[in-house]
Every structure is written in structure tokens, then in C-alpha cells.
Amino acid sequence: MIVLGLTGSIGMGKSATAALFEEEGVPVHSADAAVHRLYAGKAAPAVEALFSGTVVEGVVDRERLAARVLGDAEALKALEALVHPLVREEETAFLDAARARGEPLVVLDIPLLFETAGEGRVDRILVVTAPADVQRARILARPGMTPERFAAILDKQMPDAEKRRRADVVIDTSRGFDAARAEVRALVERLRRESPT
């Protein structure tokens, strides 16, 4: 089975690209979606213990949590030490199930793949990208996003140019869905042919 790592900086079109893989019948494990599930369940009590007042009715309030950890390196490190192992557990279960089904190809959607030294967990790396002005416009259009918050998030991420340099495949999402869909389809066909499964 080929494990394709999908990554890219914030606002580059990662989630939309992951959905294109799902359209092609490729199983996708999203680290972000796993965090959402964990924040609504298993991780909530531990997050509340670390950051009192960030859990509302049993669910982590992401805005309150962001206000506590963004710009505080120690707080962020503590949160990551709690959440990352739980996400990895879900990822391992996903991969085991896919292998058992005989899947030829799966996608791990990992926003901070390079930043968390995740290259060893995947066979190939796809980086999604877009020009900086497109990225900025996409992000600042999100509810609650400010230029300061955007800058703080970007500050934690490896520069886009370095991600592209390390990638096996790069897809520019600024050319629209049809172009991205065609590139994803061609990549899926090629990787399925290469898969030992």
C-alpha cells in the first residue's frame, strides 16, 4: 500500500484537495478532523485540566483554546504533547484497517507534516500551494481570523518554498477545481499502478 502524505501551509487548499482524493475513492485520514473528534470527546477533559475554561459543555472551544496558546510556545508545546499521540493512534488504526482491506493507496492529510518530522510515516509527499496573495485572501476571509493571528500561524509553519522543494508532487490550487481534480486523478492513477498491493 502506498501512503501519500498531503500537506501545505494554511489556506493552500489542503482540505479541498483531500476531498478530491475521496471523490476518486481513495481513503483519507485527516489530522484536523481527528483533532475535532478528540476535542469533542476523549481529549476534552485533559485539555480542560491543562487550560481551564477552554471546554464548554464537554467540547473544547477552539477560539478560547487558540486565545490561550497562540503566541505562547510553552503552552502550545504542552497542547501538542497531549494531542499529537492521540491523533497518531487514530492514524495507526486507519492505516491498519486500510491494509487489511487491501487498499492500494491511502492519503494522510497532515497539516504540519514537515514541522513534526512526519516524512518517515509516508511513502510520497504531495504539497498543495498557491501564490501568497491568494493564500492571504483565503485566510483573512475566514470568520474570526485577523492579520495578527494569520501571522502567528504562519510563523509556526515551514515556508511554502521549502515545502515545495521537499515534495515529490506539487499541485497549485489557485488554478481552480477542474485543474486540481485533473491533477489528482492523474496522480491517483499513477500511484495505484505503482502500488505493490
Image (tube, grey):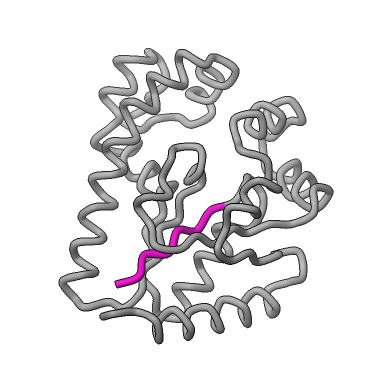
Residue at 76 percent across and 64 percent down: it is 174
Is 34 magenta? The answer is: no
x and y, in percent, of residue 93 in the image: 20, 55
Depth check, front residue: 19 or 190: 190
Residue at 41 percent across and 54 percent down: it is 30
Q: Main secondary structure of the magenta part?
A: strand
Q: Hey, which residue is sitting farthest left in the picture?
A: 100
Residue at 15 percent across and 71 percent down: it is 100
Displayed quadrant of residue 101 = bottom left
x and y, in percent, of residue 74 in the image: 46, 13
Displayed quadrant of residue 12 = bottom right
Question: Which residues are the magenta region?
Answer: 1-7
Displayed quadrant of residue 158 = top right
Q: Quadrant of the N terminus?
A: bottom left
Residue at 26 percent across and 80 percent down: it is 197
x and y, in percent, of residue 180 in the image: 65, 74
Residue 161 lies left or right of residue 64; in this view the side is right
x and y, in percent, of residue 107 in the image: 41, 64
Is 5 magenta? The answer is: yes
Position of residue 24 relative to residue 94, above or below, is below
